[in-house]
Image (cartoon, rainbow, N blue to C red):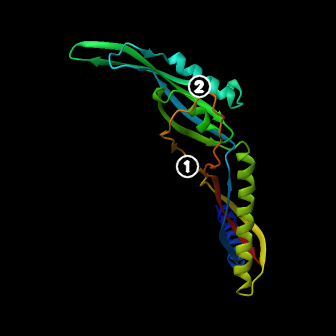
Amino acid sequence: MKKIMMALAMFGGVLFSTQAQNNDKAPVKKIEVTGTAEEEVLPDKIFVSVTLREYFKDKDNKNRVDILVLEQQLQKAVADAGLPKESLTVGGINGYREWWGKKKPTNFLESKTYTLALANLSKIDAILNRVDEKGIFSTNIERFEYSKIEELKKQVKIKALQNAKEKANYLLAGIGEQLGEALEIYEIDNGYYPQPMYAAMKREMAMSADAAPMQESTVDVQKIKVRFDMKAVFKIK
């Protein structure tokens, strides 16, 4: 029993001595800052949704314009614009039946939604102008993409971290201190912000003749903004 008590006393003495040494150790002086960086780039992939819908040419609902006729017009317009066939895909098919009078149903009318992939919007007006305007139900931009977005995000994060170091440096210089090595680095997950996610493209224009030359728009889309914040803790020398 005496041996056990002596061992506990010795262990307690060692523990107390270690704690005392730790308590005597001076705390590390440090500074914590947040750096910010952002970049804007033009998207190089734009996906436009175009919905075509069958309609009747006369009031008696007898002369219907078939969806295939409208589809062929759109396909030809895309080809005439110099775009590959793969640029145009079907995104959805819908239909509805109108009721004429009290009880008599009219013919079933079909609509198709297409997705048109473009590098920019310079040719979209010319393409839509070559499709029967009464057959175009709606158009809108589905989304924007940038093919090198991952590389751009890396570059922006590095710039944000460099900004944090620069900020810490001049703050310490203002009080006569020197910046030491980085102790901790945190990535703040605020992502990137494509702007805009959606943009209306309501079409209010007259249909051009098939023989008319295609005119390209000179208006650019809004840029994609990539922004990141990086938090860093640096030692003060």
- Which quadrant of the structure image shows residue 37? bottom right
Q: Secondary structure at mark 1?
A: loop
- Percent position of residue 219, x then y: 62, 49
Which mark sits nearer the N-terminus, 1 or 2?
2
Q: Label 2: which residue?
A: 74
Quadrant location of the N terminus in the rendered image: bottom right
Instruction: Give residue 99's mark.
Output: none
The residue indicated by pointer 1 is: 196
Residue 21 appears left or right of 223:
right
Q: Nearer the viewer, residue 157 or 102?
A: 102
Residue 17 at least partly seen: no
Q: Amino acid at mark 1?
A: Pro
- Per the image, label 2 sits on a secondary structure element best described as helix
Seen from the viewer's position, the closer of residues 181 and 144 is 144
Binning the other alpha carbons within 10 Å of mark 2 as few (below 14), some (14 to 19) or many (20 upward) gives many
Residue beneath the point at 69% across and 43% down = 44
Residue ID at (70%, 46%): 149
On the picture, is 92 further left or further right than 75? left
Callout 2, which amino acid?
Answer: Leu
Dot 1, crowdedness within 10 Å: few (<14), some or many (≥20)? some
